Image: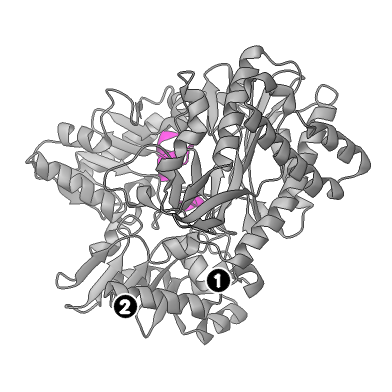
Amino acid sequence: MIKERLEKLRALMEREGLDAYLILTEDFHGSEYVGGYFKCRKYMSGFTGSAGSLLVMKDMAGLWTDGRYFLQAEQELAGTGITLFKIQQEGVPKLSEFLVDKLADGGKLGFDGRAVNYKTAQLFQKVFEKKGKKITFVSDKDLVGEIWDDRPALSAEPVMLLDLSCTGKSRADKLAEIRKAMEEKKADYFVLSSLDDIAWLLNIRGRDVACSPVVLSYLAMTQESVTLFINEKTLSDEVRAALAADGVAFAPYNAVYDYVKEVPEGKSLYVDERKTNYAVMMNRREGVKLLTGNNLTLLPKCIKNETEVENERKVHIRDGVAVTKLIYWLKKNVGKIEMSELSVADKFEELRGEQEHYMGPSFEPIVGYEEHGAIVHYSATKETNVPIAPKGLLLMDTGGQYLEGTTDITRTVALGEVTQEEKEAFTLVLRGNLNLAAAKFKAGVCGANLDYLARFPMWEQGLDYSHGTGHGVGCFLNVHEGPINIHYRVREKERTTYTEFAEGMVVSDEPGLYFAGKFGIRTENLIVCKKAQKTEYGQFLEFETLTMVPIDLDVVLVEKMSTRERELLNAYHKKVYETIAPHLDEEEAAWLKEATRAV
């Protein structure tokens, strides 16, 4: 099927005179997770991961993806004729380098300009120019749309308003804050494309993207006006009136392109070129002054206010109850009733659904048994699903969306006998998790400074994991949220690499180890940055762990931990028991007491 689709695409490429056609993972808004209408790369390649780029040429097709998906991509691309290019591996060219090498001078590269961000297109253009090649972009061709007969329609789910008790800051105050930032940047116009930023700014949420409570829309603002480009059928009278009361006007979803055309010459337009699509940018007049940088909403959204932080504490108790019950259920029933990866994922949904204000998962659940746990972002399907037996390890990375916040947690659980190798790896990962969570550091520190705390137990043994240690998390928004992250790799000119930690930022703490064909381990908590003491040397910061779920002591080699690490684990487990036990029945609470015993 994939081969047939690729041949159809090549026929359309020949019709248009294209030498190559590029299909990225993004929607029109630079989103990480996208709605069904936008899953062109998945449709054309069969690869289901959340990150990857497909390049199709006359005589080859290649897919570029990162270390989270190497094993998964190898399996899903088998038999398609598509070559896997493992990003950042030795000898593997970057997509742009591969293109400049393969395309002849005067060649034509096609793509849907709505689904490629402006920064990516610029990067390709600069690589071509550096090599002295003139390559023509043909950016108005949605060729996949011509092949995809049963393509889902654009989502148009109802828009909901968030109460001040959830957001902690009014829409009017947020708009005023962004207008002040525009003034500081000397920006006359600000066009906002990223869906979570629009939802945050207007205190609205929706269901247009699975697991992300966002609304398909664009937004443009000046000092005097705000225009929301949206399918107006999604707006109830109540929502329309509330937004209009704060000066928001409405226009059709696709009218953003005409809006940009009308920005007068001599005026300045501010955009995040990494989140604004190529088609939007190519509609601006030549005389418009372009200002670029992180979205003006990005940092204010990342720094949660007191109301949001307190709400996150509350939802992590609810989520902790659900996940703790799930682990208890597993331990009690494995080997006695039929279980599979899919049925465990369903059980997560059932238990979370019992919690107040649960709105759905924050991402597709990752439940990987034994060797499937080594596939970092494995997600079971009917074809890959396996039964679970009372032995080995089960890795479970799941999360929930609640009206007041977002959760993301990974626990690796022993279902019976485990090996010494598994225990040693589990303990290394646990030590990394505990040490990062206990960090105390001066204001001004960024994620790259802290990453070693999580990795050093593994690096000492010559081991590592290929994903980041931490990512920002939204508040009833995207489970992956910039600009904060924790990763040792410092990318030149990467704006988010150097984001300093600040009070109110929520980030994940998730080291792991993966052994292909054998097992995988990851332990993940969410932590929130808060102020510690202030001395003559400056303001110090520290983390508070939000996630309240026991860590499986059946896989811990206590003798491999330092005294301090044991104290950190015991303190965490004491808090878990005190927080979660009151919400459990007698039998569950008794089990939790033993599961959180001091070691």
Which of the two discs, 1 and 2, sits closer to the camera?
2
Q: Secondary structure at mark 1?
A: loop
Q: Residues within 10 Å of mark 1 (few under 14, many from 20)?
A: many
Tag count: 2
Left or right of 590? Residue 32 is: left
Of the residues shown, which amino acid type is indicated by label 2? Glu
Compared with residue 255, is residue 110 higher up or lower down, i.e. above or below? above
- Residue occupying the point 40% across, 26% down: 80
Q: Which residue has dot 2 on it?
A: 183
Q: Residue furthest top?
A: 420
Is 527 drawn above or below residue 291 in the view shown? above
Q: Amino acid at mark 1?
A: Asn
Give the camera-side residue of 333 and 311.
311
The span shown in magenta is 34-51
Q: Residue 408 at what x, y percent from top left? A: 61, 45
Residue at left offset 60%, top offset 77%: 236
Residue occupied by mark 1: 203
Which residue does the image show at 44% across and 54% down from the upper left? 537
In the picture, the quarter occupied by the N terminus is top left
Q: Secondary structure at mark 2?
A: helix
Sort mark 2 into few (<14), some (14-19) or many (20+) by Cα contacts within 10 Å: few
Horizontally, is 592 left or right of 254 in the view? right
User: Taking 173 as reference, is 317 left or right?
Assistant: right
Q: Position of residue 441 (x, y in %)?
A: 48, 47
- Seen from the viewer's position, the closer of residues 61 and 213 is 213
Camera sees residue 404:
no
